[in-house]
Image (spheres, coloured by chain):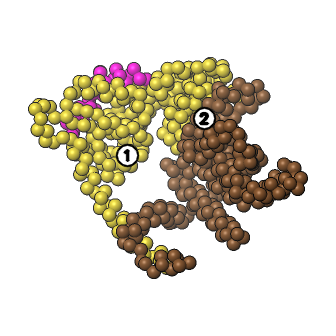
Amino acid sequence: MAYHEKVHRVRPVLGFILPAGLTGILLALPLLVLLGRGVEAGFAGYLSEPSVVQAAFLSVLTTCISLLITLIFGTPLAYLLSRWSFRHKAWIELVIDLPIVLPPMVAGIGLLLTFGRNGLLGGFLDFWGIHLPFTTAAVVFAQTFVSAPLFIRAARLGFGAIRPDLIEAAYTDGASERVIFWSIMLPLSSRAMFNGLILCWARAFGEFGATIIFAGNLMGVTQTMPLVIYNGFETNLGVALGISLILILISGLILLSLRLLEKDTNINL
Amino acid sequence: MKNFSIVPLALVLMLVLIGCSSPAPAAAPTAVPTAVPTAAPLKIVTLKIFAPSSLTDAAKELTAAFEAANPGIKLAIEFGHTPTQRLQFTQGATGDVFLTASQKDMNDAVVDQTIASGKPKVFASNQLVVILPAKNSANLQKLEDLAKPGVRVLVAVVDTPIGKVTLDMLDKWDKQFGSGYKAKVIANVVSNESGVKPIVSKIKLGEADAGIVYVSDAVGAPELKTIAIAAELNMITQLNVAPIAKSANPEQAAAFAAYLMAPDGQAILKKWGFLPGKP
């Protein structure tokens, strides 16, 4: 506490205030201008356009599916990585984390060369009558590829933060691996997992680069909200502005909910 | 309400930015070495040229040939979307020569007074062609095949100049091949790509069965198969060239425009799939 009081007594130096202020403006100004221009252009009127309505529906549908896939298939992976150690684990973790920092265009080309018609697995998929590029499934693929690592990382760290003696105690009492997972690990890391899911959803919602390369751009099939912004920018700025405002709103709500969640955690601790 | 203190700061920042932006065009002529005290008798002038991306493939050869023929001139070509470049000129961008993807864009530039009236010349024209993957696994042989159910077709999004021309062309096909043809082709479109280059790449990868692009793009990708489109079913776009009115190097700019119209320049354009300006 003493430290805090001391910090508050001393006024910040101008040398910090000036660059800090400029950075703050740089970050806030474009968003404020977007809000202003959007309201000015009567953005609400554009939100009923068919391309916007279909894109909003498609975005919600695809991100929910990719989130579900991430939860079902990502959780066991995160659990495996945090609970057991094996050879080359550090390298495996690195590869799984890589899509977080990878430019999405790279992800798109990678997906196309792997799951495309002439890709590595293209022949195999073709045998089963599956054709991924230019389908809604490809949108889900692209979103899952770029966003799942965020959840896997959060869940892995969540599982890893659970005190080992709790697990030891459960073992001593004769609990099976299954019981440990469902009754101890999952409930205790649920907040970390939820945090991860929110970040993951935000990332999937904003996905653009991998989608346009791997899935293409067709209204109602693969054209998600970020793609409408891209196409509308040159000819229909009103539509682009309207969707931009919705996405800013959603992003803001996501950050706000994460903040509230963090506060909640602190109180509980 | 601490937030309010941001407003004056923001205004100051904006003024600073506006203040900075006006001397910038004045700095552009420094690209021309005005006082070169070396022994070289030749003053090298660098021409700033704005060109549509359909010229990307042809430009390398054009540049090399023009610079070889004009030792005092170097070319710096900026490729982009013609309507965007036109807007950049109205916002204060400067340059020496403007090449446009279409007649309309050049007419607009004359209205903007970026280009003096009477200066624009049609130096080439471009047509559309259907490109197919090397394998042609959908076995497409003629234009009618694009309407067969299940064919995966790529076109440029309607917001781009070529996307608009593509739709106009489909109207012609509709008349030729019977009603419902255009609707069938559009039903086969699996993606409205953001431009010509992504279409070429995806057809090269064999992810779609057919794409509609400029002939010059197909020439730049010789490994692809094509279905030619007869002149009466095709759309012609005319590429224009003109020196920019405010160019600091009017003499050299005119020389480059003349080179494109001359037999040497025309031969290179023809080699890369462009048609003569006036067919």
Residue found at x 58% / y 20%: B134
Residue found at x 25% / y 47%: B28
| The C terminus of chain B sits in image quarter | top left
Tell me: A25 left or right of B166: left
Judge by depth and name the residue closer to the eye, B275 or B259.
Answer: B259
Q: Horizontal and vertical percent for residue A148?
A: 67, 47
Magenta run includes residue B257: yes
Please give the range of residues in magenta: B249-273
A34 in relation to A268, above or below: above
Residues marked 2 and 1, same chain: no
Q: Horizontal and vertical percent for residue A215?
A: 64, 39
Residue found at x 34% / y 20%: B267
Q: Horizontal and vertical percent for residue A160?
A: 70, 53
Residue found at x 27% / y 40%: B96
Judge by depth and name the residue closer to the eye, A189 or B9.
Answer: A189
Magenta run includes residue B55: no
- Mark drawn on residue B86: 1
Tell me: A30 left or right of A223: left
Chain ID at mark 1: B
Judge by depth and name the residue closer to the eye, B22 or A253.
Answer: A253
B101 in relation to A226, above or below: above
Residue type for callout 1: Arg
Judge by depth and name the residue closer to the eye, B225 or B170.
Answer: B225
Tell me: B64 left or right of B206: left
Identify the residue under disc 2: A110
SS of the residue at dot 1?
helix
Q: Which quadrant would residue B250 be assigned to in this image?
A: top left
The chain drawn in yellow is B
